[in-house]
Image (cartoon, rainbow, N blue to C red):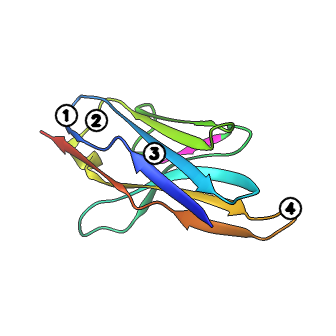
Amino acid sequence: QVQLVESGGDLVQAGGSLGLSCVASGSMFSIDTMGWYRQAPGKQRELVATITTGSSTKYADSVKGRFTISRDNDKNTVYLQMNSLKPEDTAVYYCRTTASLSSGGSMYLYWGQGTQVTVSS
């Protein structure tokens, strides 16, 4: 099994910055694309940003130019640097990855428990 643990969520004022981290641990053989998603109250979970093992990135239009995703493959960690935060960025942020448990094994999808980010106006 693979466990994802997020950290870094906090209350911040609009215009401020915040950094999130997510560490993957457990008996995985390999980790593929890692990403951040978020879910605001009353809304569906949405993509924020993803990053492949080769560091190719993808961002939601709403965060382009403000958020930066990165990863450290040696530490099985993905980061999300959030700048110029807006009240509409308020949500629970979830880490997600796909991973295999053995060489040549199937890929499985894993989610973290989430970390709350609140941006005050």
For label 4, the crowd category at 10 Å Cα-Cα, with few meaning under 14, some 14 to 19 and many 20 or more, is: few
Looking at the image, do the residues carrying marks 3 and 4 touch, with CB atoms under 8 Å apart? no
Camera-nearest label, 3 or 2: 2
Of the residues under marks 3 and 4, which one precedes in the sequence? 3
- Write down the residue under mark 3: 61
Residue 88 to residue 97: above or below: above
Q: CA distance from mark 2 to mark 4?
A: 41 Å
- Identify the element where label 2 is drawn: loop
Q: Is residue 37 left or right of residue 30?
A: left
**Mark 1 lies on residue:** 14
Residue 41 to residue 81: above or below: below
The answer to which of marks 1 and 3 sits earlier in the sequence is 1
Residue plotted at (49% across, 46% down)? 22
Gap in angstroms between the C-alphas marked 1 and 2: 5 Å
Type of residue at label 4? Ser
**Which quadrant: the C terminus?**
top left
Whole-number angstrom distance, CA of label 1 to CA of label 4:
45 Å
Residue 60 highlighted magenta (yes or no): yes
> Residues in magenta?
57-61
Q: Nearest the camera: 23 or 43?
A: 23
Residue with the mark numbered 2 = 85
Quarter residue 109 falls in: bottom right
Q: Residue at the spot x=43%, y=60% of the render? A: 46
Question: Alpha-carbon distance for marks 1 and 3?
Answer: 19 Å
What secondary structure predominates along the stretch shown in magenta?
strand
Residue at disc 3, secondary structure: loop
